[in-house]
Amino acid sequence: MMDLTETQWVRYAVTHPVEGFDDMRWKKSGSLKIAFLIVGLLFFGEIADDRLFGAQFFISYERIFNVVPYIVRSIILFAVWVVGNWAVCTLLDGEGTMKNICIYSAYAIIPYVAQLYINVILSHVLIRDESVFLDIIRIAGIGWTAVLLFSAIKSVHQYSFLKTAAAILLTIAAMLIMLFLLVLMLALLQQIWIFISTVVTEIIYRIKV
Amino acid sequence: MMSKLKRYITAATAFAVLASFGISVTASAAAPSDSYNYDRWGDAIPSQAGYTAERAVTGYDLGIDAFDSPSDIFCSYDRLFYIADTGNDRIVAADESLENAVKIYDSFTMPDGSVTTLNKPSGVFISPENKNMYIADTENSRVLIADTDGNVLMEITKPDSEIYDSRKTFLPQKVTADKAGNIYIVLGNITTGAAMFSPDGSFIGFYGANRVEPTAKIIRNYFRNLFMSEEKRARRKRSVPTGITNFDIDGDFIFTCTASSSQTTDTVKKLNAAGNNIFANYEVTFGDYTPMYDTSRNKVMAPSIVDIDIADDGNINCLDHTTGRIFQYDEDCNLLFITGAIARQTGGFDQAAALESLDEDLYVVDSVKNTVTVFAETDFGKTVHKAAALYNEGRYEEALGPWYEVLKSDGNYHRAHIGIASALLRQGDYKGAMKYAKLADAGKIYNKAFEGRRREFLKANFGYILAGTAAFAVIAAASARLIRRRKKEKEAES
């Protein structure tokens, strides 16, 4: 029973929102490599969604390209989710390891990632009057991802329905705190860096003169 | 050895810097500022000049003594310029070419035969219908209506009406009259719009008040107001909009402008006879999009439009007092040109006060330099005006040639891309239209062009697409069957 390869597991988990992740956990399946691949695809999908969209829908500001917002929106957001969930659920008797949370969450965002690419391609085929198709695909992708994510958290920690909901809310709170601290730390590091560079410049100047 | 080389390099650099300075100085000698325009992102970018300053006319050039803080200029139906020479208490009429003063009005004969003089007149208007002269005689608190020989026909003073608060002063700043002879007067310290008088001089009411800008403060005050007692409410500072500063009449519409450094709504309005603003729903920022910060004066150069003028071809010229710039828009409020600066040279202003246009030329009155600066259209300006006029009439294909010419001079000219895209779309050149619409950030035009291109593509390649789909279906079915057979074999083996 259920002798699937890792790639077949991906399909199985995505297409079985209720018991997919439970079966996966029972079989101790899931590959970190595939998870990282999905997050990578999310990153490029975000860029494509913002930059390669059909000009009849919107034209992006092309004068500058800054990769940092895309990294924040994909990789950092995902990492914060994983770490936040792990941190919260360790305290709430969750059974998931960091690795499993990462794998299951990554599998769960597949519909969202797919939706990004499908919309970018469709935006070069459709016109404005048909934009409802883009909306439907977007809503379906996001909704499906939401259901999968819930199911993934539920099975990775072996929680009840209500406990999962509470855990997700707490995770979001934890994410906000982490992002806040991250920004704070970056600001602090910048200050320190400015201080050090000023001192170094001063010393170099003194030596020269 | 090393130091010698260094010296050479320093010398060469210094020379290069000096040379480039020399070039820039000679280049900027023509105009006191670099001309710019806004691109599709709303960023200021260098552009070609639409107007050049030809000359600055002083009082002496007209054969009379110098102006003293003139504050209005008006070009009449018979192509004479009337300049309100405020400080000298007179109105100067000059000929079309601004070479000679035709007449100086400093005293008028009242209907009873007595002679009256002006006191700081700051607005003048000549009606093309009844050929009468309307003068805002500010310090005398009256508006004089006289014929061009200097005989006063009517005098309008502070109205004795319930609508007009008798505690308020009556200081006419600008005056105009519509086709029916109704008189509109912009008053100092009055924020409820222009006072409107019937042709016989009776007060009708106010016309065209500005709206209060919905800032956070206003909204907060509204909620505070709900919890206040009557006494407290009565003693509060009231939020009133800035009063209108100037206006111009064009056919059935009155265009008003409001000079305020803080207000951003209703700075330019196009009012119909009922006083409704046609521009109310236009998403246009008049003046500079992002005001520049002047470090030398520690001041944000927020636009403050003091005069507005509608040219014969329907273009709207706005004079910004803060930056000394003239912003020219076409009748649909698309920015065409930005001209002028705060500068001492010809073409720059100190206190730009009034603006008028005649044919292709612009005339700007400076109340500190005491001059009238004449701006002439450049070749580039001529091409743009021609193209924009054709485009606004809906003759897109005829505008195509001029728009291409515009792009030759200024490849960043935003309106040219829109014009070309529209024309190509109408001609059925969908690919070209898509290219230019994308450059113009015109999503609507791009959408239409794309629809046409898609239809064309499908028509041309329908056979291939059908064949491709069929082939794909066949291959998919065959491979599915193959996989199923293999699976069965595997199961049979095990």
Image (spheres, rainbow, N blue to C red):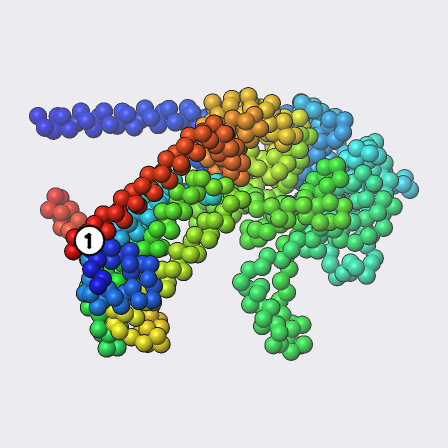
The answer to whether residue B381 is above or below residue A23 is above
Report the side of B68 relative to B31 (left or right): right
What is the quadrant of the C terminus of chain B in the image?
A: bottom left
Q: Residue at x 51, y 36 (%)?
A: B451
Q: Which residue is drawn at 45% across and 49% down?
A: A134
What is the quadrant of the N terminus of chain B in the image?
A: top left
Q: Which of B259 and B2 is in front in this view?
A: B259
Quadrant in the rendering for residue B5 = top left
Quadrant in the rendering for residue B189 = bottom right
The amino acid type, in three-letter code, at marker 1 is Ala
Q: Which residue is denoted by mark 1 in the rendering? A: B492
Report the side of B110 relative to B474 (left or right): right
Q: Which percent across, then down, holds residue B297?
A: 45, 47
Q: Which percent across, then down, holds residue B254?
A: 71, 42
Q: Residue at x 57, y 46 (%)?
A: B283
User: Does any portion of residue B106 appear in the rendered image?
Assistant: yes
Q: Which of A209 and A104 is in front in this view?
A: A104
Q: Which percent across, then down, holds residue A47?
A: 33, 46
- Residue found farthest to the right: B112
